[in-house]
Image (spheres, coloured by chain):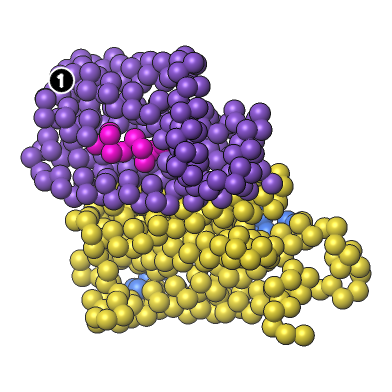
Chain colours: A yellow, B purple, C blue
Amino acid sequence: MSFWQYSSPQYFYPLAKKMAIVFFVLASILTVWGLYIGFFVAPTDFQQGDSYRIIFIHVPAAWMSMLIYLIMSFWAAVGLIMNTRLSSMLAQALAPTGALMTFIALWTGAFWGRPTWGAWWVWDARLTSELILLFLYIGYMALRASIEDPRRADRASAILALVGVVNVPIIYFSVKWWNTLHQGASVSFTKSSSMATSMLTGMLVMALAFWMYSIAVSLVRVRRIIRDREANAGWLTESSGVT
Amino acid sequence: MHSAFLSLLRKELLLAFRQKTDVVTVLFFFLIVSSLFPLAVGPELSTLKIIGPGVIWVGALLCSLLALHRVFESDFNDGSLEHLVLSGEPLTILVIAKVLAHWLVTGLPVVIVAPLIGLQFGLSQASLVLLLGTLFLGTPVLSLIGAIGAALTLGVRGGAALTSILILPFYVPILIFGAGAVVADLQGLSIDGHLSVLLAMLCVSIALAPLAIASAIKIALE
Amino acid sequence: MQWGSVSEFFAMGGYGLYVWGSYLVTGLCILIELLTLKKK
């Protein structure tokens, strides 16, 4: 058996469970560590006081909202082009978590904006495009829910996801292209960071924690989707060999 | 291929001409919706001048949504869409013909009528010209992207509301740059950026939207 | 440790509403997500 056997729902199903357990454990450890740094190591900020500690959720959630959309679109495209069911199921599994991350980013952003900018919401480029991202996720899920045939739903929603993928670079580069209220990039691969080290470390650990969590949750969800959609398959109803 | 495009365009325009009520209804919707705002906000001209470009643009957007069901639905229901797909002509070309006909019949009238409504809002001549220009660039994009939504939801329950929530996120950038250009001009700011982005959106959507629409139609017909 | 007392920790320098409003809602969202996955 080669690696490619895992593109079949039947073989991926038990692997997903094992992977999910690993990722949940990683997520838990990283979350505890990240929150420890965030609350007990990182000092109070000179300008923002302790309100900045929202960053340990806000930035990881925002990063995940964009990353998940890209990954979701990738699997949707693979499913569309190669006609593989599991790829489309993965895209289907990723969407709710992506939407949740977007919501968390918007909510925590508002709660951070209120004390820092004086406003719960401003219509600047980054916030507006992140809000649009939430609508894109919801549109994707709504379209899927409205189409009864799962294969047609796979293909139609894939096209929708791909049309919307252009929004992600807009969110990312919006702070560079427009004069916006939202802070510019303080983390870059090319320049040194403008944040204190402990703050940066805490944020990165939490970002990793959110990533591990998203993977774990999506794997559990794809298992449920496999159970729903492959319900008539023999391998699911057999009592042996299924974990 | 060229003749297929032209004959399809001609057929669509002929059908629309025979059923003028569809077109006229959309236009009246535009007029009425635009009139709602002065009635709600009050006739203070200074206020109307500020909200005018935005209101007219949103009106044009809503008209585009309203008219979308015309693009493919009736052809899907009576089977002629399937004939188009099976005809052997490149589907993307046929799609452009259908969307062009749709825009000529529902988008262009809105563009032409918009300056008249702009007068109701007390906009200056320069603003009216700019409004005309941005709508002229923007409404084809609305038709093209709207057609993607219409094609994706062919025969799907949920109808107009579903199509609307699918496409409105994509309409937002067009609205921001279209209405934003007129507003920025009122404030004396440069509008080169706005117009460039609008034109870029038009070019990109003419190039790519037909591909998405054709794929969506094929998916719907399976 | 940088917090003088437990009450200081909860106050977050006056920003308690915003910090804990964010963390609690996030925790709630994650809990809801996990619960909806448990059900099936």
Residue highlighted by disc 1:
B122
Q: Quadrant of residue A63?
A: bottom left
**Numbered disc 1: secondary structure:** loop
Foreground residue among B213 and B118: B213
Would residue B137 be counted in the magenta stretch? yes
Q: Residue furthest right?
A: A239
On screen, residue A210 above or below B76: below
> Label 1 neighbourhood size at 10 Å, few (<14), some (14-19), many (20+)?
some
Q: Quadrant of residue B52?
A: top left
Q: Quadrant of residue A199?
A: bottom left
Foreground residue among B192 and A234: B192
Would residue A233 be counted in the magenta stretch? no
Q: Residue furthest left?
A: B188
How far from the left and from the top, in percent, is residue B147? Answer: 48, 39
- The residue at 47%/76% (across/down) is A208
Which amino acid is tagged 1? Gly
Question: Which secondary structure type mostly characterizes the magenta part of the structure?
Answer: helix
How far from the left and from the top, in percent, is residue A95? Answer: 56, 57
On screen, residue B28 above or below A71: above
One can see residue B203 in this view: yes
How far from the left and from the top, in percent, is residue A50? Answer: 30, 66
On screen, residue B169 above or below A173: above
- The residue at 43%/31% (across/down) is B101
- The residue at 54%/53% (across/down) is A159
Foreground residue among B90 and B144: B90
Chain for disc number 1: B
Q: Residue furthest front?
A: B3
- The residue at 72%/65% (across/down) is A223
Q: Which residues are magenta?
A: B134-143
How far from the left and from the top, in percent, is residue B8? Answer: 50, 33
